[in-house]
Structure formats: structure tokens, C-alpha cells
Amino acid sequence: MNRVLSSIRIPSRDEDPSSRLQQLVRQRRRIARQHVHLDAWLSPRRWNAATGIAFLAEIPACVANPGLDAERAARAIRVLGFFVLGATRDETQGCAHGPRRWSH
């Protein structure tokens, strides 16, 4: 896990917050696509390693920078987290692989 998470480049805090957030999300999606089986295991777990914590700490920093109050920042982080989790799951296991065949 650490080897994969350490491949994430943390953008400089001098960069625009929205650009930093986009870079972090793109890198998270890259990891999901490159390590499909690891991502299915990694997504629902805590990222308690130093590399995971460093990545996760950047998300609130990006969201707090535009001046959101604590409640709105927390909601934005939660929405973003669910969106990224859903997007990576879909890209690696879901509809991105084509239409599903439903049995009747």
C-alpha cells in the first residue's frame, strides 16, 4: 500500500487550490486504474500510513483555502470523497466496462 500511495505527488500549497484538488483527484483515479485489485481493497480502508495521511491532509487544505466555513468545507470534502470513490469504482469495475447484462 505504501509503495502505491507514495507514487502520489503532493502539489505545492503555493498553487491554486482548485488546481491542487484536481491534481490530487486525477492521481487518485490513476492509482485506481493502475491497481484495480488493490484499489478495491484500499478504498474502504483507512489510510493510516504516513503516505496516505499526507494525501488525505491535502484535501481539507484545498477546500479550506477558498474561505468556506467549517460546515461547508466538511460537506464539500464528504461529497468529493463519495464522488471520487464512486468514480473510481465505476471506472475499474462498473459501467465504464460496457453495459451489463441483466438476467430476467
Image: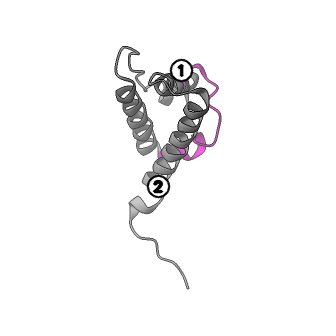
Residue at x 45%, y 36% (from the top left corner)? 28
User: In terms of depth relative to the viewer, which is nearer, 65 or 34?
Assistant: 65
Q: Residue furthest top?
A: 14
Residue at x 38%, y 29% (from the top left corner)? 18
Q: Which residue is mark 2?
A: 90
Choose the circle earlier in sequence order: 2 or 1.
1
Q: Position of residue 21 (x, y in %)?
A: 41, 30
Instruction: Using the rendered view, name the quadrant where residue 22 is placed.
Output: top left
What's drawn in magenta, residue-wise? 36-51
Q: CA distance from mark 2 to mark 1?
A: 25 Å
In the visual, does 54 lie left or right of 33?
A: right
Q: Position of residue 5 (x, y in %)?
A: 50, 28
Q: Amino acid at mark 2?
A: Asp
Q: Residue furthest bottom?
A: 104
Q: Residues within 10 Å of mark 1 (few under 14, many from 20)?
A: some
- Magenta stretch: includes residue 42: yes
In the visual, does 9 lie left or right of 57?
A: left
User: In terms of depth relative to the viewer, which is nearer, 20 or 27?
Assistant: 20
User: In terms of depth relative to the viewer, which is nearer, 59 or 94?
Assistant: 59
Q: Of helix, strand and loop, which one carries label 2?
A: helix
Q: Quadrant of the C terminus?
A: bottom right
Q: Of helix, strand and loop, which one carries label 1?
A: helix
Q: Which residue is mark 1?
A: 54
Instruction: Using the rendered view, name the quadrant where residue 66 is placed.
Output: top left
Q: Position of residue 44 (x, y in %)?
A: 63, 43
Residue at x 34%, y 28% (from the top left corner)? 19
Q: Amino acid at mark 1?
A: Ala
Q: Position of residue 23 (x, y in %)?
A: 37, 30
